[in-house]
Amino acid sequence: MKSGLNTLMYKFCLLLLVSLFMSGCATYGQKAGSTRDNLLAGQVGIALAAVEAEDKDQEEVLASMNKGVLRRMVGDYSGSNQVLEVAKQQIEDLYGISITDQLGAVTVNDTLRAYTGDRYEQVLLHAYMAMNYIQMDDLDAARVEILQADVKMQEWGEAPEEDPFVRYFSGMIYEALGESDQAVVAYRRASEIYKATVDKQSLAVPQVLKADLLRGLANEGLWDEYKRLKKDFGMKNFKPTKLGNGFGEVIVILHNGLAPVRSSNTIATASGADVVDLVKIALPVYLNSPRQLYKARLVANGKSVNLETVENIDSLARSALDSDMPAITARAIARAIIKHTTQKEAQEQGGSLAGFLMTITNIVTEQADTRSWSTLPQEIQLARLVLPKGTQNVQIEMFNGAGVLVDTISQSVNVQSGERSFISEHWTSPNMVMTVTAGK
């Protein structure tokens, strides 16, 4: 009996140390909220410094993902890709399911599971690396990165697992490289995937993509498909344009708002009057509705066009959590059963005090996994505009819900005849002063 009690108290002390450590640390959701507050205040540098300092306290994958976005926000594209590459390699290394992770998830909490990101996050990691390469004037490297994203999506098999924006973005890269036939394939596929994933993103096929697909079909001489889709799209007045003869194109990609942050929903139950019958279950949840975003308009050379949403990351995040909830809930129930058993055993072997202490330990260690790539935008928006060659002043105008202009982001772009230039901006509030731009 004494030996069993000593073993029990040893286990308790170990769990108590874990619980004290965990209770003294902010949850990931709290840290993400702090980063979010800094970004909403336009303090990108402060947000980056804080995340860099907390690297040792986070999962390597997630820390690298967040640093990657924040570094590109301040124009450090090379440094951004350096840490995003770390995340990418860690995900590959953790691709298998760890027995240790699984054991910790069903005995302590889900935060002990290695973080590899949801599928949409893994694909966007490649997309952001490709954007960084474009901004470093390395289209070939961007092409390689986007091909790796394609391999990743193909590994998952089902078409609805593909990301339509990433397919669309790959088409832009192919066009910029002069691979018009590959661009048409990508645009066609992106159109199909938007239709297949409408439940996940609540996005129809963007008008800008419809125009790109029709233009590509015309340039490739695929007139039968061109005429059919022109009718299906309801774009009878559409006229395809071809770059050259003194005209180039500017492609604006706006990363608008901030992705939602997960919170914890705690449920406490009691199967009897005794304290050892208390059981706590904690589940991740998105408590708040999507934030109302500012609307954006692209203005240049006397022309204007509204930016369209091409990736609804807020919806993707919520859909991913909904899909994972059955497994998350099953693990939480399994933990509750195991912890309740340990509480009973502690009381039987060590008395009321031991049972009480084990109950407190189990309650403290039960935490929801609130981790997610929180520095992603709420939406990615896009617009394309054909402009005369030469230096062009391009403006992105931001409007609030009442249609009032609240901010203007201005860029000078050297438009080359027959070529495409990319502008990429991260915007969270009128207080932001940072800029992310690139030429071809």
Image (tube, rainbow, N blue to C red):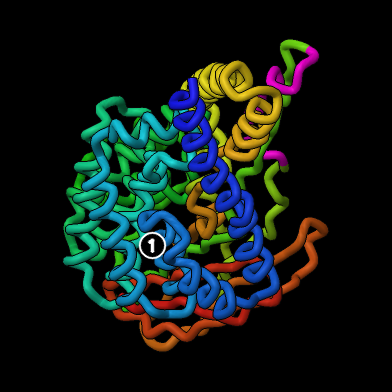
Mark 1 residue crowding within 10 angstroms, few (<14) / some (14–19) / many (20+): many
Q: Nearer the viewer, residue 150 or 189?
A: 150
429 horizontally vs 189: left or right: right
- Considering only vertical position in the picture, is 195 above or below 376? above
- Which residue is drawn at the image coordinates 36% and 80% (left, top)? 415
Q: Which of 127 and 105 is in front in this view?
A: 105
Residue lying at the far top of the rendered structure: 272
- Considering only vertical position in the picture, is 350 above or below 261? above
Residue 141 placed where, x, y %?
19, 66
Residue 275 part of the magenta segment: yes
Residue lying at the far front of the rendered structure: 2
Q: Quadrant of residue 242?
A: bottom left
Say which residue label 1 marks. Answer: 64
| Quarter of the C terminus within the rendering | bottom left
Residue 175 placed where, x, y %?
25, 59
Residue 414 placed where, x, y %?
37, 85
Specify the segment rendered in magenta.
273-287
- Which residue is drawn at the image coordinates 52% and 77% (left, top)? 49
Q: Is mark 1 on a helix, strand or loop?
A: helix
Residue type for callout 1: Ser
- Which residue is drawn at the image coordinates 46% and 51% (left, top)? 208
How many callouts does the rendering have? 1
Residue 91 placed where, x, y %?
28, 48
- Which residue is drawn at the image coordinates 39% and 79% (left, top)? 76
Q: Which of 117 and 294 is in front in this view?
A: 117
